[in-house]
Each structure stands twice: as C-alpha cells, then as structure tokens.
C-alpha cells in the first residue's frame, strides 16, 4: 500500500524563471539574483539581440525589451520525499528574442528553405491593403495608432501585438531576390501569478540551490497557439501558397509537445509550413542553455490548424447525445407581453381606439 501511495504522488505545476537576462537561473548567485530585482530591464543588454543585432529593434537598441528580463520559464518540481532535491522541467521561451542565439535559426532557415545560410532579411513588410470601406479603414488606422502608442509607452516588443497586415520577418536569398520565405517566431505567454510574486522569495533566500516560485503559473500554450499563432497562419499562408512561397515557424519543443500530432508531408515542395523546432541544451556549456535545432517538420496549413487546435471533432451521434442531455426550454410556457411601462388598464386598451 505504501508503494502504491508513493507512486500516486504527482509533482505540482509550478513554473518559475529558467533564464534571466540571458543567465541560467540555476547558476545565478543569490547576490546577483537580488541585484537583478532592482535594475531597469531597459538598461541591460540582451545577449541574444547582441549576437544578431540586425534582427533586433529598428531603433538599433540592443537592450532587453522584455519587462522584468525573464527570457524563459520552466517547471520547478519540489521534492516528493525528505532529502530529495528540486528537479526541473524543460526550458520554454517566453521572449522571441531568445530564438536569436548565435544566429542558429537564421542559418538553418536559410539552408532549409533558400539554399543559403547567409540570407538577407526585411522586416514588417505590408501584406494587406487598406479596406475599401471608409469605416473599416478608419478602424484599422486607429488600431494601428493605438498599438504604436502602447509600444512606445512600454518600450517593449510584444509578439501578441503584431499587425496581421504585415509580414513581420522575411528572409531572402542573397543572390536571388525572388527566392524568399516568411518567418514567424512564436514564444509562449504564461497564465497565473505575475513574475513579481517571486521577488520576495528571491530576496530572502539564503540556501545553496534555488528558491521555489512564489505563485502558481503555467505556460499558456492555448493562448499562444490557437488564439495567436493560428490566425497569423490562416491569414498569411493561403496567399503565400498562391505565390509559391513558404512560411517558416520557429517554436520550441515544449510548444510542439502541447500541440496535437500533425500529419507531415514527405518533401518541402509539398508543404505550406516549415516548423523549426528548437530545444535548449544545458549540458553543452557550464552555466548556459544552448539553443539547438531539435527537428524540422513539413506540414500543410490544414494539418497545422488541426495541430494547433489540439482536438478532433466528435461524431454526430456523440454530439447529439450530449445535446439532448443539455436541452432546456428557451421561453416559459406562457410568454408575458410587454406593456412598456404603461399602467395595466391603459396597456389593455388597443392603441387609437377610445375607451368605452
């Protein structure tokens, strides 16, 4: 019985900082962690932008543009038994700049899709024309202006604010401008307690390991996938497909694992989307997590949508059985007639006829 009870214990999901300002949280000394709490992220150089500065902000700034400086998250699993150590889940990126490390994805996408590992690039290329309806055009212009004001005020690049009217990043063959591909880099949002809730625990921690997260949170793959990435693909890929161009999508392994299994095609010529899946190797260099290409997948748009939706439609009989169990009357048996606030006697008199 004791063995069974022990086997049934499960690790709670407590996600905390995996990498902070480019440093692996596990290896940051306590004093340095406390120092990170009190600095302005806008004043800290981003090591990943610094390695591929051309793909950084148009302003040319190479400092961190993620409030709080958290590059990635991971699951902290507390000891199940006395004497056990904390264990950790895989790293998942929360900032798209994390994918820029060493230009690895630039070279890989260039080789895979263009036949050159030194592609040229362009950013934020207009994709949708202005609506012809004056009201729709005004609404689109106001939305763009509002987004620009928010970005300027926050001084951050929020991947969730990307305008679907633009292709955010394009790689082009250096010797043939007709050979190009669109690129999406999708980090994950998180749901739950703000990262600031971990700060007090970091300040008072004096052990030799790492403090546990101060709040319950988790990567929100549903918001990041079906709600954000999928609309981008559904709007852009059909046109790219008509043009004979491909979309490269960069995600990490935990993001892929949260998707349903996608049907792959056998050759790049038959696909719409090339998925570049990365992981972070913590055994290659001491104190660092090194980005590496985990796998490359070729899929159609339709199978990508199925994978992001992460669910198969139920059968008609199954749906109708559930429907019948949930049915209720929408209206009561006798529907009262409105009297529009008039006294009952007045409401009962037909309009335009004298009272008798």
Image: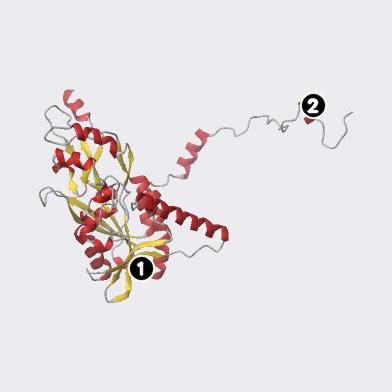
Decide which of 311, 225 is in the foreground and name it. 225
On-image quarter of the N terminus: top left
- Picture coordinates of residue 280 (x, y %)? 19, 51
Looking at the image, residue 202 sits to the left or right of residue 122; the answer is: left
Indicate the secondary structure of the residue bearing disc 1: loop
Read off the residue under disc 1. 245
Tell me: residue 321, above or below residue 275: above
- Picture coordinates of residue 137 (x, y %)? 53, 60
Looking at the image, residue 188 sits to the left or right of residue 315; the answer is: left
Q: Residue furthest bottom?
A: 175
On-image quarter of the C terminus: top right
Read off the residue under disc 2. 345
| Residue 32 image label | none
Q: Residue furthest top?
A: 1
Residue 35 quadrant:
top left
Tell me: residue 132, above or below residue 343: below
Disc 2 residue crowd, few under 14, some 14–19, many 20+, Cα 10 Å: few
Q: Residue furthest right?
A: 356
Decide which of 78, 262 is in the foreground and name it. 78
Residue 57 quadrant:
bottom left
The residue drawn where x is 36% and y is 45% is 222
């Amino acid at each position: 019985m004791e063995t069974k009870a022990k086997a049934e214990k499960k690790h709670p999901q407590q996600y905390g900082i995996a990498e902070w300002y480019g440093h692996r949280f596990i290896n940051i000394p306590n004093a340095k962690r406390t120092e990170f709490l009190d600095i302005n992220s806008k004043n800290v150089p981003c090591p990943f932008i610094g390695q591929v500065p051309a793909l950084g902000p148009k302003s040319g700034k190479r400092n961190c543009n993620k409030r709080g400086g958290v590059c990635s998250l991971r699951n902290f699993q507390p000891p199940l038994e006395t004497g056990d150590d904390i264990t950790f889940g895989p790293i998942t990126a929360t900032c798209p700049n994390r994918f820029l490390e060493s230009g690895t994805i630039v070279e890989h996408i260039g080789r895979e899709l263009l036949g050159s590992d030194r592609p040229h690039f362009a950013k934020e290329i207009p994709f949708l024309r202005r609506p012809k309806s004056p009201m729709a055009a005004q609404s689109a212009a106001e939305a763009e202006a509002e987004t620009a004001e928010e970005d300027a005020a926050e001084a951050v690049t929020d991947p969730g604010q990307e305008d679907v009217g633009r292709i955010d990043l394009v790689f082009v063959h250096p010797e043939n401008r007709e050979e190009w591909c669109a690129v999406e880099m999708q980090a994950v949002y998180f749901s739950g307690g703000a990262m600031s809730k971990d700060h007090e625990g970091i300040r008072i921690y004096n052990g030799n390991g790492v403090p546990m997260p101060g709040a319950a949170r988790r990567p929100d793959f549903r918001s990041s996938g079906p709600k954000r990435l999928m609309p981008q693909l559904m709007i852009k890929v059909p046109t790219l497909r008509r043009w004979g161009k491909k979309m490269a999508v960069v995600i990490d392994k935990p993001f892929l694992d949260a998707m349903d299994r996608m049907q792959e095609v056998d050759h790049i010529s038959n696909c719409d989307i090339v998925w570049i899946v990365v992981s972070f190797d913590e055994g290659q260099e001491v104190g660092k997590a090194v980005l590496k290409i985990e796998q490359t997948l070729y899929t159609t748009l339709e199978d990508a949508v199925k994978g992001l939706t992460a669910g198969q439609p139920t059968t008609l009989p199954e749906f109708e059985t559930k429907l019948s169990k949930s049915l209720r009357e929408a209206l009561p048996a006798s529907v009262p007639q409105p009297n529009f606030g008039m006294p009952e006697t007045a409401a009962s008199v037909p309009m335009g006829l004298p009272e008798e």
